[in-house]
Image: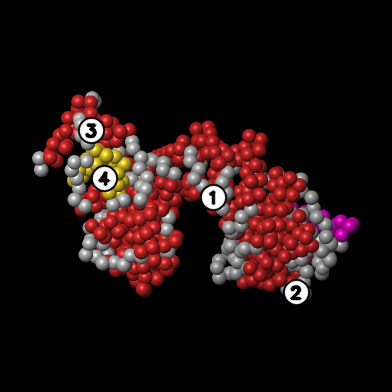
Amino acid sequence: MTTIITRTRNTSCHETHQRQSVSSHRSRKDNYSEIVNRTLHEHSSSSQTRPVTRNCIAINKAITQAKTTRQIFRIWQESSRNFNYVNIATTLNRLARFGIASNDTSIINDISHTLLQDNTSVLNECGPQEIANIVNAFAKLGIQNDRLFEALARHLLDSDARLLERCNSQHIANIVNAFAKLGIQNDALFKAAAQCLLASHARLLERCNSQEIANIVNAFAKLGIQNDALFVAAAQCLLASDARLLKECSPQHIANIVNAFAKLGIQNDRLFQAVARCLLTSDAQLLKRCNSQDIANIVNAFAKLGIRNDTFFQAAAQCLLNSDAQLLKKCNSQHIANIVNAFAKLGIQNDRLFQAVARCLLASNARLERCNSQDIANIVNAFAKLGIQNDRLFEAVAQCLLAADAQLLKRCNSQHIANIGNAFAKLGIQNDALFEAAAQRILASDARLLERSNSQHIANIAWAFIINHYCHHDLLQRLLAECFVRTSEFTEEQLWQLHQVWLSLSYEFPKTQVQWDLSLLAKIHKTILNPQTTTSNLQDDICDQLHNLGIRFTTEESIRGLPIDIALKDRPVLIEVHGPSHYLRGTHTLDGPSKFKQRILEKIKYKVHTIPYWEWHNFSNTMEKQAYLQRLLREESTR
């Protein structure tokens, strides 16, 4: 419990100012009420202060001995006229402990009014501890009072932040944490707090314990207040003396720390790798103490900053899967979305985890129905990124999006639709009803949704429809109209996507008339002139065998901008060499983009042969490989 250290003042309660020293806030074991009452008695008997009225002492004793919220309400109603700032701080502290109903906030309003009255000096006589207790109580109760918090911030910052400079590390941690919890932005206060923590070679920051550091960085991150110097110093404190302070962290502290760094995009590989080691040490004892939210936040932070640690991620997956996936089953939809999204972002495969996630989501309709549009978009996008097929899950997702007149789909923004469409397209899962409903969602209200889209969303949506072989004229026309005003924004990858849209409309849907911007087409043409091609050992081996057979061919060619593996010189025959990346994980099913490429080449009147990697790897010698190629090409020549 946060302790109150009282000061005296010259008021009707005859208090004068005197701070009580405390050796270390980390080692405080005194009971809250004992400290408050003892301090009040010391003030009243001190020869250096004016005596505190026995009434104030009695009030405080009654507050600390109260067992219910109602008892505290009664004390306030009977004696509020005689309350001093210690009584106010004590009242708020106790109410924060007991909690109050939403319809019982009148006492808080009364206290706020008392603190803000111009004709009293109650607020101005509050010290660091009282301010920390007051804002902490408001935050715990979830009651926002911007005017009071602004007044308290001004009080801390007056006279060159003299009062803030008297704060210890716990005061600062509680103050910034309270502002952040209630979402009250005060950049001047946070900047001054950082300066105090960093002054004299970060002396005050070095006195912080693990919880205080976690609360401080978390508060800055919650309000989006960037202070790289503070975060660098905080990391140094955590890593000092063989990461002693980091090793004292609880799972929640670690989750809050890494999450704060990730939210503000502050890269610190050394800290994150130390976090991973800390979680994995002693047979991953600390990791095993994590709850589902801790794991979700930690892996999500690693992924956001692109920091990869396969050993840690696999251990996290194992924790989620232990005891029949009990921890995974406790995850809410956001936790699941963050976890799978983190694995996918870093390209870390774990089929057992993903299939367990699918079973978890499919266990009951209610589980999937509790997902919001962003959760669903992140989940299906993660499966697609790693090429993990689960038709049952995707079918259930489509039904969920289309249920009740597509209410959930109607709540999707352009990014959600782009990610969902992309996922279905990459995995080659066709669902015309879903794509038609998505088109209607985008075109609704005169396609207002596209006004909030960026070039990536537009390119991804158009590409997804085409890859999935679903041509929607009105949607494509509207998307291309948006391209006209964003021509300069498209990246090379997005221009490649738009080129594939152009190929599909030209060869698969030639009767679909849409208007293309000439400058956009020129940019696309420039991009596809030099397609980037790489050859694999598998392709090199096949080329060697063709050469030994005397078959004339070319490599590293492109047809209509599509890179070709092998093209025969004497006939319109192509050989596509398909390694594992062309197939859905653990299957012999081609992914969506590979199917699309084959469709287009066949529309251009080429015969396309595919050589799957697993067939070629079955051959043990040159004779078997050459016989395979001869049989493949002989079949073609006899047709």
Residue 147 part of the magenta-drawn span: no
- For residue 546, which numbered disc appears in the image? 3
The residue indicated by pointer 1 is 262
Structural distance between the alpha carbons of marks 4 and 3: 24 Å
Tell me what residue is drawn at x 54 percent, y 50 percent.
Answer: 262
Label 4: which secondary element: loop
User: Mark 2 or mark 3: which comes first in sequence?
Assistant: 2
Q: Is residue 231 visible?
A: yes
Label 1: which secondary element: helix
Structural distance between the alpha carbons of marks 1 and 3: 51 Å
Tell me what residue is drawn at x 60 percent, y 40 percent.
Answer: 246
Q: Can residue 364 be seen in this view?
A: no
State how many labels appear.
Answer: 4
Near-viewer residue (169 or 103): 169
User: Mark 1 or mark 3: which comes first in sequence?
Assistant: 1
User: Mark 2 or mark 1: which comes first in sequence?
Assistant: 2
Near-viewer residue (346 or 333): 346
Q: Nearer the viewer, mark 2 or mark 4?
A: 4
Residue 39 part of the magenta-drawn span: yes
Near-viewer residue (585 or 178): 585
Question: Along the horizontal axis of the image, is 114 left or right of 13?
Answer: left
Q: Nearer the viewer, mark 1 or mark 3?
A: 3
Label 2: which secondary element: loop
The residue indicated by pointer 4 is 590
Specify the quadrant that holds the C terminus: top left
In the image, the segment drawn in magenta is 32-49
Tell me what residue is drawn at x 30 percent, y 63 percent.
Answer: 402
Structural distance between the alpha carbons of marks 2 and 3: 93 Å
Structural distance between the alpha carbons of marks 2 and 1: 43 Å
Classed neighbour count for the residue bearing mark 1: other residues with Cα under 10 Å, few (<14), some (14–19), many (≥20): many
